[in-house]
Structure formats: C-alpha cells, structure tokens
Image (cartoon, grey):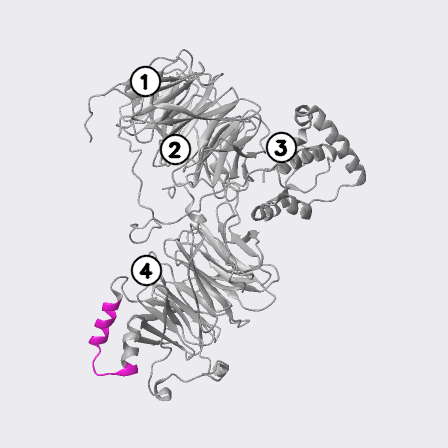
Amino acid sequence: MAEEAAYIPYVHCQTLNSHGHALSSVKFSSDGRLLASASGDQTIRTYAINLKGDPIAEPAQVFTGHDSGISDVAFSTDARFIASASDDKTLKLWDVETGSLIKTLHGHTNYVFCVNFNPQSNMIASGSFDETVRIWDVTTGKCLKVLPAHSDPVTAVDFNRDGSLIVSSSYDGLCRIWDSGTGHCVKTLMDDENPPVSFVRFSPNGKFILVGTLDNTLRLWNISSAKYIKTYTGHANSQYSVSSAFSVTNGKRIVSGSEDNCVYMWELNSRKLLQKLEGHTEPVMSVACHPTENLIASGSLDKSIRIWAQEN
Amino acid sequence: MNAPIIDPLQGDFPEVIEEYLEHGVIKCVAFNHRGSLLAAGCADGSCVIWDFETRGIAKVLRDNDCAAAITSVSWSKYGHRLLVSAADKSLTLWDVSTGDKIARTTLQQTPLHARLNPGLSSPSLCLACPLSSAPMIVDFEIGCTTLLPVCVPEMPDVLAPPQRSKCAESGPPFSPAAACFNKCGDLVYVGNAKGEILIVDYKSVRVLALVPVSGGSAVKNIVFSRDGKYLLTNSHDRIIRIYENLLPAKDVLRSLEDLGKNVDGVDGVEKMKTVGSKCLTLFREFQDLVTKMHWKAPCFSGDGEWVVGGSACKGEHKIYIWDRAGHLVKILEGPKEALIDLAWHPVHPVIVSVSLTGLVYIWAKDYTENWSAFAPDFKELEENEEYVEREDEFDLMPETGKVKVSSVNEDEEVDIETVEKDAFSDSDMSVEELRYLPAEPIPDTNEEQDELKLIEARISASPASEEAVQNGHVTDLVSSPQGEMGETRGKRKRKPSEKAMELQAEKAKASKASGRTVREKSRAVGDQEIDESVNGGGDDDDDAYY
C-alpha cells in the first residue's frame, strides 16, 4: 500500500479568455504539448503548453468553419488531427499544424454531442442527440457503423486503451459497452435507479468506467462485475453534461467540474474530497488532466479556461 | 482485458461471407502478426495493404520495375517488413511504414512461395520455393542464395519408400518441393516429391532428420501452426496430414544434435529417420472420402484448434474446416469461382479467401443479437418455459420503507492502471510491433461538397428509395476501398427518371436559394451519407440501422 504523501494543493496559474462564448470541452493531447478547447462561439482553439514557460499556455491556432456551437473536441493519438462535434449535425476533421479543415463527416441527424478517436486513430466514434453512436473511418470519412445505442441523447463516447471497446452513455440512464470491430453490444450497465448519465470514460487500464450522473454523483463501475465500486459526491451536477477525468500523475485522483463554479478533486480509493478549486464564475463544464505533469485545465460557461498547477 | 466480458462461445469459426474487398485482381493474401493489417499481391505487380478494422486501404506498394503478377506475400514477425515474390522471378523486400523498397533480387526461376524468417525482428533472410528447383535461402544483406537439399543423398531405391503409381506424374526432373521455417526460424522443414519431410539446418546446409510421409506422394504444401506445435502437410494423394512437433521451442538445433548423437548403430538415412521419428509424429489425416479432391492452401487457425483447407476444384469455392481431432465441422461455400488462396485471421474467427476473379472474400461468424447485452435483467431462453407464479406475487404489500442497502464495500482498493499482459504477444516484446499504419484522411474537395448538396436535393425529389438498406451492408463497403465517390456511385445508383430529374433540377435551384431551411425540412435528409445506404422518405426509424 502506498503511503499517502502530504497533499500539495493546486493553484490557479493562468486564465485564457480567447473564446467569445461558453466553453464546452477542453482536452490535452496525448503527448501533453497541446491543449484544445471547443466553444459555443463555433470555434476550436489550440494552445501550446510550455511547462517551463510563463504563461504556460500560449494560443496557437483557431479553427473556424462550423455553422453552430461545438460540443466536443478530440485529438488523434499523434496530435496531428482534431475532430470536433457540433450542433450543425456534422463532425469536422482539422489539421492541427495549419488549422485547416480536412474533412466534414455527415450522417448524424441531430446535434453531435461527443467525439473521440480510437488509440490507433484510424476510427472516430461520435454520439449525438439522434440517439445513435456512429463509427467513422478517418481516411475516407465514411460512416462505418451506426450503433442503435440509446433512447435518449448520447452524452459521451470513449474507446478503451486498445481500441476494441467503446462505452457510450445517455440521458436514458444507461451505459453501454460495444465491440468496436463488429458494432455489437457487449454489455449494458445500469442500476436500480437510472438517473440520466451525463458523462462516461474508461479508466486507463480499461477495466473500470467513471460515470457521472445528473444526481450530483460520480461513480466508478467495475465492468466485469457490472457493479459500481466507488461513489464520489459533494459537487453539483444536475443540469449540464459536466466532464470528469482520472488524474494519475501524482497519486490516483478523480477530477470533475461542477455547477457550483468549482473544480472538485477526490482521492480515488478513499473517496475523500481533497480540494475545491475556486475561481470560475459560472458552472465548470469540462476538466482535463495533463498526461505527464500535474496540470489541470478547466473550461467554464464563463467563457474562460483556467490552468491549475501544483505549487512548488 | 475484455476477455471476461466477451462471450467465449463466439471464438469459433466463421460461417458466412461478411463482405468482400476489391483492388485490381488479387492473387495472394497474408495477415500480419495481429491480423490488424492484410497484405495482398495483385496481378499488376502492386501490393496493397488493408487496415482490416476499417476495411480501408492503408497503403499501396507499387514498384515501377515490376509489372508481373505477385505470387506470394509474407510479413516479418513484427510487421515492419513485407516480402513480395513476383512472376518475373524477383523477390522484393519492402519497409512497410515508409513504403520504400529495401532490397530486390532476381532468381533463376519464379518463386511460388517466399517466406521471411519468422525468428528475426528485421529479417533480411528468406526462404523461396520456386516451381522447378529446390527451395533456397536468399540472404538480402550478403546477396547470396543457398540451395537447400531436397533429398538425402543415398541409394535411391533400397531405402526410399515404395512409390505409388499415381505419383508417377510428379516425376524426378522437376522435383518440386515445399518448405517452411519452423517457429523460431532456425530450421527449415522441406517436403519433397518423394513424400519425405526433411529437417534442414540451413546455416550449415545439412539434413538433420527425415520423416517419411506415409503413402510417399509428393508434398505440395507444408505449414506450421502459429505456436509451432503442429505441422501440416498437403500431399499429392489428396490427404492433409497433421504432425505433432516433438522438438522443444527453444534451442532446437542443439536438441537435434543431441538426438543425432544418441542414435547408435545406424548410419546415413536410417539414422536420419530415427532422429526424425523423434521430431514429428503423425497426429491426424484429413481427406474427403467422397469427392477425393485436391486441397489448396491448407492452414491452421490462429489458435491451432482448427484446420482449414480450400478445395482445388475449378468452378467451386469451397472451404473445409476440421477440428484438430479430425471431425469435419463445416464446409463454407462461396460463389462459383475457383479459390486460389486462403488465410485464417490470427486472432478472430475470420477467414479470408481469394477467388480466381481477384476478389477477397471475408468470412465471419453469423451474428445473432445477444439481447441480454442490452438489458442486464433479460434472460434468454432456448425454449418456452412454463411460468409459475408465486403465491404472493400479486398481493398488495404495505410500503415497508424500502431502504436500499448498498452491499458494496466502497473502501476496497481499486487499481485503475495495471494492465494484464496481452494474451497474443509471443515471446519478448523488445521490438515494437507495427500494428497500424497511421490514417491519412483524404481531404474533402469542393466537388464533394457540391455533390452532397445534389444528393440532398435528389433525396427530397424522389421518395422511392434508391437502394434498400439491407443491401447497403455489402454494397456500402464495396465502395469503401475505392474512396472515389463519383465512380462507385455511378455504378450503384439507378438512373432517375426524367420526371425525377426535373424535380431534382427544381429542387437544386430551390435548395441553393434557401440553403439550410430546405435541408432541415425534408425528413429524408436524415442520412446525409456520401454513399448509398439512403432511405428516402419512410420512417426515421428506418434510417440505416443495419
């Protein structure tokens, strides 16, 4: 058992006010060099992360082209491309370096809400208000599969670490796990009560999923036993699709946004609330943890992104 | 890691054709180590690599010097290199990730089969089996070829097994032989025209052991299973034989030498046979007693549990699947085109077969929907069960304060990071495997944007659907490897009638004028797919859910 080192709090180090409308999603690239943000102002922006620098995040590119607000953005594994999901019913694939639009993926019949690349980055999974999950081929832009996933808007999709499974969550209260190769449903995770699920993602080893529901609770489910094994409360989440993340760079933690304008951090195993990061003036919609450094980015309805780092 | 949740009964053998891949006229196929990439050689001398997950083309290796049909493709162990042999007597070694040619040699005869050494991570050594001479080892680095012995030099008639008259056709002048590496690549197993398996140490060019195949007819194919425990021979007498490999996995050469030393009293061929009997034992024989057909491209399944062989009769595309115990479990029948090559996916129950017309058919399991995956409290029954009510089932109970007691111990330690070792990784993973070629998205062009608008207009114009969604599955994916929308669409779409064309023209004008509103209004816009599976009109529920 690892000893609990004294907790070093995170402090606010930077605010980015580049967007003109509420932030919906923030993501770090897997090499940690870039941060991407998606907003209701119909643009996606990327920022270069310089850990030694001050400020840490420098604006890099702006991606314009969507006709409507954007709900989600995702990096490919090599950080060469980003995919964005928008209310204009399309997904767009952009070149990170040049900021140019490469492809538009048509097919969804309602707002596209969430998007993710698979680890091999040859496929994209997207979830939409049209209650389906679509799997797209990155090279041709063709829709490979349409999964009849849910009976309410799909709020999150995520691939596991070898890309063989997809988890999807929806306001209908269910989380479903799909085989990404065949498109068949492998498992459905639900409990006696089914509050709308606002967010889901796989744990780094793919054995657990972190599920956020609109009853102000976050749960960690064990996929094989189909039971939840941890509960995290204290934050507010009853209206928006607030995202959460695993922080593994310094002790195992769960980080989540909240509708009371703070970022919450719990210790994974003990479920103790470690810190509430205050600073935003409106609900925090999305949080992202840097893959290697102790850095957290949060995006909020107050149109700003805040970067938090551990003081040292 | 997903093994615990995926139904174990589904890892069997394929049953139906799922789809087919097309790229020119394909001659031969090979899966990489994981089955994530499929390499195929074409009749025009180019080699195409498909990303097997998306069924899209990942790379095309084209050599301007070579325009002759490819006779075989072979991957290196970790998938970095690809060896291609062609009908113009050449062998080319390609670097897969860069698409560059590493080396190329020309042999005396056309190699029918060429295999890279499976033991080395960056092999430059390969085994080539030409049609009309002995198999040879080709070393690209040194640039030399070494012929391997095809028979044991000894008194021919005294010790060789009696020849059946049927085999007179495979006469001595050509002595074709089949050969393959063993799993770690330090021995070569040669099957010769006299019906013997020779175990050869190719470095010293010595025959170390000899195993006579019963019946003594020429060996046409010789293949190891993936784990190296079983060896398969396909002989001219139409029998497929399975041998169990008794040699240990590591240090094979030394074990063979030791075996050789321990045999006393006999010399020459007899000694080799005695050693041989300690290396391989006959396990099973497979043949079709009814039709007595010749077999083509037999091989093992990825886990070695199944043996598959294609029928070599012209005009039929039949694949026989046996389990290792010898029972014929399935005959897969495809369209009436002769089968020229076969490969079993290393991991999934998927078979890929190449027909004479150059199409690659993908066979997979026929999936029956697992309804209990959609709702955990569903119980699937095989047959009707009589339901017996409990005595108090419909009684009205007073609310007894339902308190849900969580039976979960939330204090237990949870590990979210460690991953189990991959079941499919053999030996050491010191070299990184090339599993995928990075996807390069093809940029949308302006024409494609305009065509999209035309499709939308068309959809609103002709409510009668162009293509039923049911067909869409196979036709969908036919167009995927092409990537050229315009051309495939031309093949598939029905020509709209004149009235529809007028309506379309009107709508096109209207849609350009009113822009988004037209799109949103017409329900059928539901599927704005670039390809065919469009259902015009009808319910939204019918939208392309396959």
Discs 2, 3: same chain: no
Mark 4 or 3, which is nearer the eye?
A: 4
- The amino acid type of the residue labelled 2 equals Ala
Name the image quarter holding the C terminus of chain B: top right
Instruction: Give how far across and how far down residue A87 sits, in percent.
Output: 55, 24
- The amino acid type of the residue labelled 1 equals Cys
| Residue assigned mark 3 | B541
| Residue assigned mark 1 | A13
Name the image quarter holding the N terminus of chain B: top left
Q: CA distance from mark 1 to mark 2?
A: 40 Å
- Viewer-closest of A174 and A143: A143
Among the 4 quarters of the image, the one containing residue A267: top left
Q: Residues within 10 Å of mark 4 (few under 14, many from 20)?
A: some
User: Which residue, as the protein is rendered here, is positioned at the far right?
Assistant: B499
State if disc 1 and disc 4 touch (CB < 8 Å).
no
Residue A226's label in the rendered image is 2
Mark 2 or 3, which is nearer the eye?
A: 3
Discs 4, 3: same chain: yes
Query: Would residue A261 be found to the left or right of residue A98 on screen?
Result: left
Discs 3, 1: same chain: no
Mark 3 or 1, which is nearer the eye?
A: 1
Instruction: Give how far across and how far down residue B481 sits, in percent.
Output: 56, 48
Q: Residues within 10 Å of mark 3 (few under 14, many from 20)?
A: few
Q: Identify the subunit bearing mark 1.
A: A
Mark 1 or 2, which is nearer the eye?
A: 1
Residue B119's label in the rendered image is 4
